[in-house]
Structure formats: structure tokens, C-alpha cells
Image (tube, helix red, strand yellow):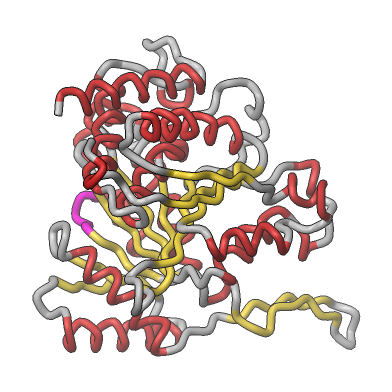
């Protein structure tokens, strides 16, 4: 690689977190070290704490200092948070609060969750192979509004001594317009189809959601095919005929649930990456961004070398594409993942009964070796 074509230097904040997060992140570290050495990337990483690890050190799910680093980084690479040892901590300091603060303070309103079923893994899905082989869905989830952030959010004691829990579902026109625009723009790079999911039959916010998505489509994206579906029916259709969907756009709560349903279509939660993006800076064209696997911290297998690092590596590939402008390298990383599966290499969660599973580090080594081969093959 010549100096003129050298990649731009980038600063990435790495937050491995808890449970299997550090183990999965270690396999990304291997890839970054190699691509830096080859001159394919110029990534500088800074590591900090989040989740339970941050609580143990700072009595907070993420420190103000770490948050400042996240705000100035080109992107954040996030592992996983949580574990039973932190079940008793104050609610505002629970491990998940660190993730929510990152999303809120970075204004990461668009969560992209691809669900891809590699042909070699179709038999690992809980559905029939013919229903999922070749599956390629992108769920676009609104991430900073809705019931997770709406106020009031409280548990109150009533006059009769009973308690009442309240969470408020709130959306504005602007919040819906901007997430719909992201979905339509991404659909234009895929199969040009968007399905919007809400519950307009029983929720007033769902009525507004459908109206605004429809108006946004008519105003600027009429070339994209738009359909609407009630979110509960969407969940049913995901397990009935998932390949009917291309891009699904939905709110925070339904997106959380539907993306986990889509995850199991691929065979394992350990397979799915995600990207959370903010608004585009009008001057630089860049977005605040965080990349994380969909799986949780899996404390039951933490430290045992059983974790599947694929979702973490695939999240890194999304970072290359959306934050670092290295789409070709991202495609090569994704090709390496598919090729490793074709070679029959599996971690325990997707191995089945006829394949001896490899460890987390062995899977990482196999991915790196295959990435080298893909790049050398040109």
C-alpha cells in the first residue's frame, strides 16, 4: 500500500465489558493488530471500563472520563455487560445503564441489526433450512425514544398500599422521520423494500408512527417499496416466512424483541452484530457510532473459551464500513467469516452433534488466517 493510499488514522474506544465481552473482543484485537501491521488500517485503540466492571471500579456503569472518550472517538467498539454478581446494585448503576447512557449521550438513534443465515449454518437454525438458507434481513430500530426513555418512568405507591409501575411510550414526528429516512436509504442499497412495524390498532404512538413513515415515504422515497405490518404479526411472519423481508423499521421496544427473534433464525445469538448510529455531522459528514454484538454477557460460559466471537468480529466489520470508510476490507472480513463456516469450523453454540467445536481463540485464529488468504487472493 502506497503512502497516498494509506488509510486515515482513526481513534477507537474499546469497551470490552463483562462476561464473555473481553474474550470476544480479544479476537478483534488480533485482527486490528494484523491489519495495522499490513497498512490496511491505522487504528489506535483506547480501552476503558463499562458495565459491572465499571461499577466495581467507579460505582457507576460508565465513568464520566470514559464517556468523554466515547464522545471524542471516531467510533466505540462495545462487548457486553451484566452478570448475577451485580443484581443487587442500585438501579441507576446497573451494568445496562452504561449502555443506555452511551446511546443517549452519543445520540445514537439508529440501531442496525442484520440477520444473515450463512448457507453452511442453515441446519443450525430452529426453523427448517429451506426457510432460512440465504436469509438477509436488516432490522432498523429506533434507539433513543419510545418506552425505554419516555417519562414518567417510575414505581409509585398508591393510597391503598398497592404499587404501580409506569413506563411511557413517547415519539415525536422528527424522531420517526429520521429513523424512517435511514431505513429507506439503506433499502436503496439492498432490495429496495421496507416494512414498517408498529401497533397502530391499540397504541396512539403507533398511529403517529404509521402516518409519519407513510408521509416520509411519499415525500422523498417513493421509489422504495413500503409496506406496513402490526408488530405482533411481524413476529409471527419472521418465524413463518422470514425471507419475505428486506429492511424492517420499527420502534425501540418492538425492535428489541423482533431483532432477538431474527437472531434465532440464524442459529445463535452469537452470530449477530449491530451498529448504532447518530445523525450525520453537516460539516464532516461523520456520525457518532457504536458497534456491539447482539448477544449478552453469557456469564454461565465466561472464562471457559466457549464464546462465539463471530458477532464481535462482524460488528468490527460494520465499523470498518460505516465509520472508517473501509467498505472493501469490511467485505473481506465478512467473506472470511463465511469461508470459515464453509470449512466446518464451529464454536459450541453452532457445532451440532457431528462437529467437534473449537474454542473462542481457535475461531479467532481461523478467522484471521482466512482473512489473510482472502486479502492475498485479491
Q: Quadrant of residue 162?
A: bottom right
- The verdict on residue 243 being magenta is yes
Q: Quadrant of residue 141?
A: bottom left
Q: Nearer the viewer, residue 260 or 158?
A: 260
- Where residue 255 sits in the image (x, y, percent)? 43, 63
Q: Nearer the viewer, residue 140 or 250?
A: 140
- Where residue 264 sits in the image (x, y, percent)? 40, 42
What segment carries the magenta color?
Answer: 241-246
Say if residue 201 shows up in the picture: no
Residue under the image location 64 percent in, 64 percent down: 68
Residue under the image location 33 percent in, 62 percent down: 234
Q: Quadrant of residue 121?
A: top left
Q: Is residue 104 left or right of residue 176?
A: right
- Is 48 rendered above or below residue 196? above
- Is 199 rendered above or below residue 311? below
- Where residue 319 sits in the image (x, y, percent)? 38, 50
Residue under the image location 58 percent in, 21 percent down: 305
- Is 58 rendered above or below residue 298? below
Q: Quadrant of the C terminus?
A: top left
- Where residue 228 sits in the image (x, y, percent)? 26, 74
Residue under the image location 17 percent in, 86 percent down: 218
Say if residue 189 shows up in the picture: yes
- The verdict on residue 262 being magenta is no
Q: Quadrant of the N terminus?
A: top left
Q: Is residue 200 left or right of residue 225?
A: right
Amino acid at each position: 500500500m502506497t503512502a497516498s493510499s494509506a488509510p486515515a488514522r482513526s481513534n477507537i474506544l474499546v469497551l470490552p465489558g463483562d462476561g464473555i465481552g473481553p474474550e470476544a473482543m480479544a479476537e478483534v484485537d488480533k485482527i486490528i493488530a494484523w491489519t495495522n501491521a499490513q497498512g490496511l488500517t491505522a487504528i489506535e485503540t483506547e480501552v476503558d471500563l463499562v458495565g459491572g466492571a465499571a461499577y466495581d471500579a467507579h460505582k457507576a456503569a460508565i465513568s464520566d472520563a470514559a464517556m468523554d472518550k466515547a464522545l471524542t472517538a471516531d467510533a466505540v467498539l462495545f462487548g457486553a455487560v451484566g452478570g448475577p454478581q451485580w443484581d443487587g446494585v442500585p438501579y441507576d448503576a446497573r451494568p445496562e445503564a452504561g449502555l443506555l447512557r452511551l446511546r443517549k449521550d452519543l445520540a445514537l438513534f439508529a440501531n442496525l441489526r442484520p440477520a444473515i443465515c450463512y448457507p453452511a449454518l442453515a441446519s443450525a437454525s430452529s426453523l427448517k433450512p429451506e426457510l432460512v438458507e440465504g436469509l438477509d434481513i436488516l432490522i432498523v430500530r429506533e434507539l433513543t425514544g419510545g418506552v425505554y426513555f419516555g417519562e414518567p418512568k417510575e414505581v409509585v405507591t398508591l393510597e391503598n398500599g398497592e404499587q404501580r409501575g409506569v413506563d411511557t411510550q413517547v415519539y415525536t414526528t422528527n424522531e420517526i422521520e429520521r429513523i424512517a429516512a435511514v431505513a429507506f436509504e439503506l433499502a436503496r442499497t439492498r432490495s429496495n423494500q421496507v416494512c414498517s412495524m408498529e401497533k397502530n390498532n391499540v397504541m396512539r404512538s403507533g398511529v403517529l408512527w404509521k402516518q409519519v413513515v407513510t408521509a416520509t415515504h411519499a415525500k422523498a422515497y417513493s421509489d422504495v417499496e413500503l409496506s406496513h405490518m402490526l408488530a405482533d404479526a411481524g413476529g409471527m411472519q419472521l418465524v413463518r416466512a422470514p425471507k419475505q423481508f428486506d429492511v424492517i423499521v420499527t420502534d425501540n421496544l418492538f425492535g428489541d424483541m423482533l431483532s432477538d427473534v431474527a437472531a434465532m433464525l440464524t442459529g445463535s445469538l452469537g452470530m449477530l452484530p449491530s451498529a448504532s448510529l447518530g445523525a450525520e455531522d453537516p460539516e464532516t459528514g461523520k456520525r457518532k457510532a457504536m458497534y456491539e454484538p447482539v448477544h449478552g454477557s453469557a456469564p454461565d460460559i465466561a472464562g471457559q473459551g466457549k464464546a462465539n466471537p463471530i458477532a464481535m468480529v462482524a460488528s468490527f466489520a460494520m465499523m470498518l464500513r460505516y465509520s472508517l470508510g473501509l467498505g472493501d476490507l469490511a467485505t473481506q472480513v465478512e467473506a472470511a467469516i463465511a469461508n470459515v463456516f464453509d470449512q466446518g469450523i464451529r464454536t459450541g453454540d453452532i457445532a451440532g452433534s457431528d462437529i467437534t467445536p473449537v474454542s473462542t481463540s481457535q475461531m479467532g485464529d481461523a478467522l484471521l488466517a482466512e482473512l489473510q488468504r482472502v486479502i492475498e487472493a485479491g
